[in-house]
Amino acid sequence: MTQESLVEYGSRRVIITITAIFCALLEIVDTTIVNVALNDMKGNMGATLSEIGWVITAYAIGNVIIVPMTSWLSAQFGRRNYFAASIIIFTVFSFLCGNADSIWELVLYRFAQGLGGGALLVTSQTIITESYPPEKRSMAQAIYGLGVIIGPTLGPPLGGYIVEHYSWPYIFYINIPIGIIAAILTLEFVRSPKYAEKKSMKEVDWAGIGLLAISVGSLQYVLERGQEDDWFASPVISTLIVVTVLGFLFFVWRELTAKNPIVELRVLGNGNLRVGTILSFILGFGLYGSTFIIPLYTQSTLGWTAQQSGALMIPAAITTAFMMPIIGKMLQKGAKQQLLVAIGMLIFFVYSFWGYKILTPDTSKEAFFWMLIFRGIGMGMLFIPITALSLSTLKGQQIGQGASFTGMMRQLGGSFGIALITTFMAHQNNVHRADLVSHLSVNDPMVQQRIQGMQRNFIAKGMAPDVALQSAYKSMDYMVMKQASVMSYMDVFLYIGLMFLFCIPFVLMVKAKKAAPIDMSEAMH
């Protein structure tokens, strides 16, 4: 069966597209939906804060391990069978997550759920792409991109609603009916391309699989837990950093010398793909970093609920949804990929600088609206063109191999972004607090006047004078901490924006072919 024979028409293509998008959405929503339920899980299972964090970490590790192996697994078992099996694994372990009795049982099930989920992202992209004729494949990227962009913003408000009105196991149970329907539709409608001869089990690069799992799993753990465990002060983190470095070195050596490598590294000899993997990393940094930072700021500093924070992101997601088909059409008409990426990065810089300017201890909801619209436009202009740019000079099987790199780098970019932002903010909080405190002298008449005013307010509420004075000093300390925190958020916005601005000249220097429509199989993740 040739690749072209996989093109579908009419209602069959609609069914396949909807099935693939729902599977991608299932996986992406599940990465963020648990965030707002962690507190309930912690109380329900008697877990510590450190233990409950593993619910997120285990899922991410499972995801990142499976992504680079997906092309090989599809070839080994057939794409339809592999996709259906991944849906079933994801659905079964969603049910088991909801029924878990202990924290470590839940962590184990979340890891297995992540192994199934990682394949959903990569394979659903391939299926959508190959169901469309070449002249409509940029539009196929746009359709898939909607799910990838909107998914992370759906998680928190949906999770908040479920936890508020039902209980936390239902954030996993909602996957079950969708998963069952998706598995049936996949087996009924999805077809597999004809692959080269399968490798026997003896020919499988087991050493490569082991080294990849160890090095990527260790790296993901370090990124997720490093800040909480105080980085090099933790023997576990220090050991895993060494394991990550050595694991990657041995993995690269193994893949360059093995007869049948699990990941084909030689494809990185292509210049555009190398640039594309870097841009994908930066895109993941910006996408997941900003998706992480805004709800954190609105909930911890402004006191919003999870539902309110999630709802704030919806206009930006709708803007991106509106932009995706437009960008797809522009690429079909021959628009330069690197120019669209450069404009998208400039718009993302404007969004970040705007955020830097408007953040205060009491920023209103209205102040965020147009800033987040710019984020939506910027993201819409980055996703598809970066994919197209990465794969524009690759051919045949190289396209799927190159797409695995861009997908993994985007995922790792998000993990790096969140880890770096968390560490950076902890450092900046201390710096800004020390700076603010240095300007507050107890001998300063203005400070004394403020303290006395607060003391009188507390006395008026029935406090004894000495207790009221202590409360006034505590209130002053709280205000300093809050201001230091806001300044740290401002710094994050500014530096993310500058990172995107700095990349623009390098993007414009990249050469890209004015080619026929690109087959971007497996591209988005």
Image (tube, rainbow, N blue to C red):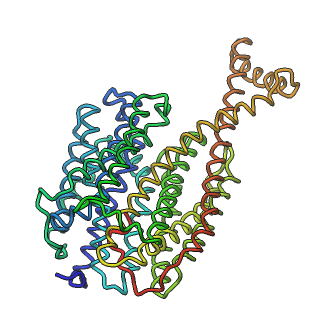
Viewer-nearest residue: 207 or 140? 207
The residue lying at 27 percent from left, 38 percent from top is 106
In this rendering, is residue 379 above or below 26?
Answer: below
Q: Position of residue 349 (x, y in %)?
A: 63, 62
In this rendering, is residue 297 above or below 458?
Answer: below
The residue lying at 36 percent from left, 42 percent from top is 218
Q: Position of residue 400 (x, y in %)?
A: 32, 70
The residue lying at 30 percent from left, 58 percent from top is 255
Please identify the quarter of the rendering in which residue 476 is found: top right
Image side of residue 8 versus residue 54, left or right? left
Image side of residue 350 versus residue 326, left or right? right
Q: Position of residue 307 (x, y in %)?
A: 47, 49
The residue lying at 55 percent from left, 72 percent from top is 341
Image side of residue 57 versus residue 348, left or right? left
Viewer-nearest residue: 53 or 233? 233
Viewer-nearest residue: 373 or 203? 203
- Quadrant location of the C terminus? bottom left
Query: Which residue lies most toward the right here?
Result: 445
In this rendering, is residue 307 above or below 470?
Answer: below
- Quadrant location of the N terminus? bottom left
Please identify the quarter of the rendering in which residue 348 is found: bottom right
Q: How many marks?
A: 0
Q: Position of residue 381 (x, y in %)?
A: 53, 71
